[in-house]
Image: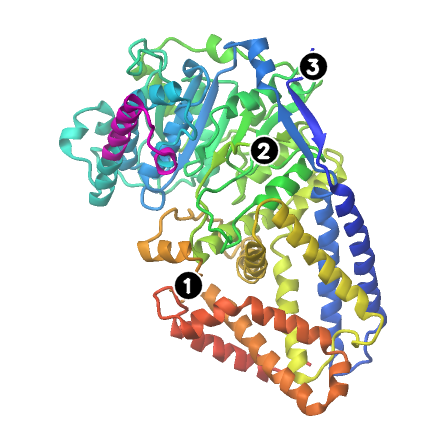
Amino acid sequence: MERLFSTEKVGGRALYKLQAVTVFAGICLVLCYRATHIPAAGTCRAAWLGMLAAELWFGFYWVITQSVRWHPVRRRTFKDRLAARYGDRLPCVDIFVCTADPHSEPPSLVMATVLSLMAYNYPPEKLNVYLSDDGGSVLTFYALWETSSFAKHWLPFCRRYNIEPRSPAAYFAESEKPNDPRGLEEWSFVKGLYEEMTERIDSAVRSANVPEEIRANHRGFSEWNTGITSKDHQPIVQVLIDGKDRDAVDNEGNVLPTLVYMAREKRPQYHHNFKAGAMNALIRVSSVISNSPIILNVDCDMYSNNSDAIRDAMCFFLDQEMGHKIAFVQHPQNYNNMTKNNIYGNSFTVFNHVELRGFDGVGGPLYIGTGCFHRREILCGRRFTNDYKEEWDRGIKEKIELSINQTEEKAKSLATCIYEHNTQWGNEIGVKYGFPVEDVITGLTIHCRGWKSVCNNPLREAFTGVAPKTLAQTILQHKRWSEGNFSIFLSKYCPFIFGNGNISLQQQMAYSVYGLWAPNSLATLYYVIIPSMGLLKGIPLFPKVMSPWIMPYMYVSVVKNIYSAYEALLYGDTLRGWWNGQRMWMIRRITSYLYGVIDTVRKMLGLSKMAFLVSPKVSDEDELKRYEQEIMEFGTSSPDYVIIATIALLNVVCLVGGLCRIFTSGRNMTLNGFFLQVVLCGLLVIINVPIYEAMFLRKDRGRIPFSVTLTSVGFVMLALSVPLF
């Protein structure tokens, strides 16, 4: 029988492997030089040993990263074969969307995502869309109620014209008006309906109130008559569209997907386990409404960009040869609001095309929390056995014929605060608790139970979302990721311990690439401070310019960066975008990842508790304008900016002071081991040019505040006065 998907090796890896082998040889020579030229006990021995430790770390981490770069694979699906073999006899799918705050995550944005998921090219009677509102907001419920009405127009429009993407916000922003009069009339009509709906939703959010005349239109609004708050409310489950109801049809008489609103119970005295808790409540609530064997979870800002994404996923699950081994199908994260030159380094093009596929080549990619199709049974703790066989129609067979009211009441009982007490939920069942990156630890656990996963990266991106539009948002996002992954690495779930004997060594290394993001901050901080200060104080820390030992340093640095730039250009980035990415590589490591280390250690010592901060999806007009102009956003007196400004100022002072020392000391000083320190310090100054502009030249509200600049000057003076050498 013909396969439903194929696996191909990514081409062009011979060049990479040649580069990697030579770079590895260079790293070994660098470490050899550093270890065999330790100066006698004196003023710079400690600094030299620190350089050895930093270079050992960089070398070790580079070796770890090869696990996701050595054997990348590409998957290709055959949807025509799926259609020929199964027709519409396809499994039911439950789609989970999670939101938490109507102000950080505007309901109109969330509803565009929901509509795109309802409009899949898939039998609508087999689609069930659930929105988890962890803010328990009547504004979000109102927005979903509006969406349930607009869907009756939107879904037929999508089918008739086979449009892409099926998020109305993205479609009307990208599409041009049709040429034919009839198409133009319908296009304008649907666009008008959407804009009116969006304005009503946005107006309600601005006023923080849903008018009483609207509340009377649905019994669900009565849930908010008791003065509930986002952190203290009863469980709420409302079926806005019942797919089993014959009257639940669109304007052309076609069945609509089931649409459900859920706000799990929140009480101040009970820990709610953040997004993981919401996901587990969704798993239980959906089990009594639809109980589909496949679950898709999507972040509220990651709309469906490809209406065939579900059929793509089914090619993996229904494949006769490999399907029974696959636990989940992970799609990459893509963004539709990237600037041309990737100002904040948020483009994941290389990660998506190389690292995620490389992860796939060693046992399957990690679960990244969105754009992922799961088997329900496996997400609920089932271990792999060779005789495993999925009952694809059980979701239909097990539906209990209850009234909507009875179904909602039963579902509410599964979303209470106390339901999980003395159960294995969050441990052996469902999404795991205890880590800020619940997705990664859940995926690791699934892999250690014997299952495989696959990465599907189709030509037309399956999901597209909103990237952070400010530096603060970017730093916050990476802080959560680095802290979460590092806390996993230091726990009993460390891939080298938990995964030993369960997954391959390469897959253990692949998970550790992200688990060790945070400690990169320590070696990076050392490398951007100590060589520059050594230059200023006349302490050489690298080989002399005429020494043969300088060659491995130069080779590793030049070749690694040339290949990095080539890879970025190959997958669509610009050269300036690559350079911006290098700047953000440094900034993330001296801020986000440093905080990741500090907060993880604090939690291990019991000095703080785990928190989950929602990344804002909104920016004011000035911030948005500067983002589009690719001007870095600061504007507040954040400790993050103090660190960034201090490092930038320290390097420019060290470069100027060091060059003055060299010029006044004659040519011999240049040959005495300072060439690489001058180059390193000079590159750090060049890469920090936007920081200097924000401190001294810019006048807009996004500049670095004078208080931050003044504080940074103080720290630089303090650093230069400390006898480190």
Q: Quadrant of residue 362?
A: top right
**199 above or below 613?**
above
Quadrant (top left/top right/bottom left/bottom right) for the N terminus: top right
**Residue 466 percent location from the top left of the image:** 43, 43
- What's the CA distance linking mark 2 and mark 3? 29 Å
Q: Nearer the viewer, mark 1 or mark 3?
A: 1
Q: Where does label 1 land, which residue?
A: 634
Residue beneath the point at 40% across and 29% down: 166
Instruction: Assign the magenta stretch its main secondary structure.
Output: helix
Q: Amino acid at mark 2?
A: Asn
Q: Amino acid at mark 1?
A: Phe
Whether the residues at callouts 1 and 2 have beta carbons within 8 Å, the answer is: no
Pointer 2 or 3: first along the chain: 3
Mark sitting on residue 387: 3
Image spot of residue 304 (x, y percent): 45, 31
Q: Say which residue label 2 marks.
A: 457
Q: Nearer the viewer, mark 2 or mark 3?
A: 2
Is residue 266 visible in the rendered structure shown here? Answer: no
Does residue 337 appear to the left or right of 699 in the view shown?
right
Label 1 SS: loop
Write the start and end of the magenta stretch as one range: 171-196
Name the side, left or right, on which 45 lies relative to 598.
right
